[in-house]
């Protein structure tokens, strides 16, 4: 599972949602595809900005992911009870208590059915202690 | 893991390969995306025909999947030591000793990097005893 984050072009609005449809799609360049609900705010923001971040959830952190099945508004540097900071390349929220993250730019997409598959190339990635 | 099968337009040539890059991408219609190596014969045949089959591998059958990391030519109704029959909708090979299979038609693709992501809609599916 993962927590997907995105933002409006002006950076004023953040979207945070939970996903589990993800797969690697290329080694060179390293690409990942994620499925995003077509009528979601995350979808609108990814289309608008062409970028998103994936916060990878640890096995013991599943409740953290479930928390973002409902939407939350940020309060300062916290959203849904999770502290976050802005990604260095995209400004999308990076949750500070998850083991790793990627920032991605969209290089391809398939919009068919109730979710769009966005294929993203790595802009930046990090591991946390 | 899964075993991906495809065929030439005239049905004379079959490709069987192993994959583990797969994700659901939509509930309605039910879509699945698979990553296929861009320089593989499977890739050529899926582009040519627009269809493929996915043979789902059981947990105890991983060696069956590894077997198709190298290519095999069919001998009658067997390939790489696995019995198969033609899929009812596509003619792609369905391995008879795997728990389930889907036949898919391609409804979208992203060709970027060393693999192409093919998004497929279900044509037919089956469970085996």
Image (cartoon, coloured by chain):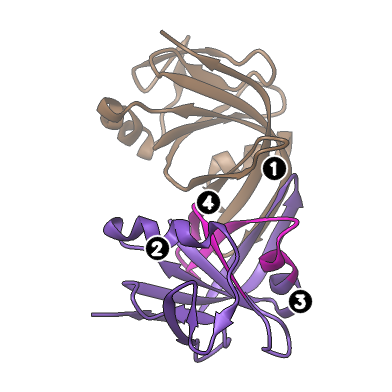
Chain colours: A purple, B brown
B55 in magenta: no
> Label 1 crowding class (10 Å Cα cut-off): few <14, some 14-19, many 20+?
some
How far apart are labels 3 and 2 at the CA level? Answer: 27 Å
The structure residue drawn at horizontal position 66% and vertical position 35%, both measured from the top left corner, is B30
Q: Are labels 1 and 3 on one chain?
A: no
Residue A21: mark in rendering:
4
Closest to the camera, between mark 1 and mark 3, is 3
Q: Are labels 3 and 4 on one chain?
A: yes
How far apart are labels 3 and 4 at the CA level? Answer: 21 Å
- Residue B100: give x, y in percent of width and height: 47, 20
Residue B82: mark in rendering:
none
Q: Name the chain under label 4.
A: A
Q: Secondary structure at mark 1?
A: helix
Name above or below for residue B3 compared with residue B108. Answer: above
Name above or below for residue B15 compared with residue B12. Answer: below
How far apart are labels 2 and 1 at the CA level? Answer: 41 Å
Q: Does residue A45 appear left or right of residue A123 in this picture?
A: right
> Label 2 crowding class (10 Å Cα cut-off): few <14, some 14-19, many 20+?
many
Looking at this view, is A74 or B119 the one in front? A74
> Which stretch did the figure color magenta?
A15-44
Residue B47: mark in rendering:
1
Kindly indicate the quadrant of the structure image that contains residue A42.
bottom right
Residue A64: mark in rendering:
2
């Amino acid at each position: 599972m993962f927590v997907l984050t995105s933002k409006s072009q002006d950076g004023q609005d953040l979207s945070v949602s939970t996903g589990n449809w993800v797969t690697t799609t290329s080694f060179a360049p390293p690409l990942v595809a994620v499925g995003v609900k077509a009528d979601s705010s995350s979808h609108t923001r990814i289309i608008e900005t062409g970028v998103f971040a994936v916060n990878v959830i640890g096995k013991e952190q599943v409740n953290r992911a479930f928390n973002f099945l409902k939407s939350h508004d940020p309060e300062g540097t916290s959203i849904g009870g999770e502290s976050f900071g802005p990604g260095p390349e995209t400004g999308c929220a990076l949750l500070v208590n998850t083991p790793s993250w990627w920032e991605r730019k969209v290089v391809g997409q398939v919009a068919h059915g109730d979710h769009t598959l966005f294929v993203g190339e790595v802009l930046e990635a990090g591991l946390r202690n």
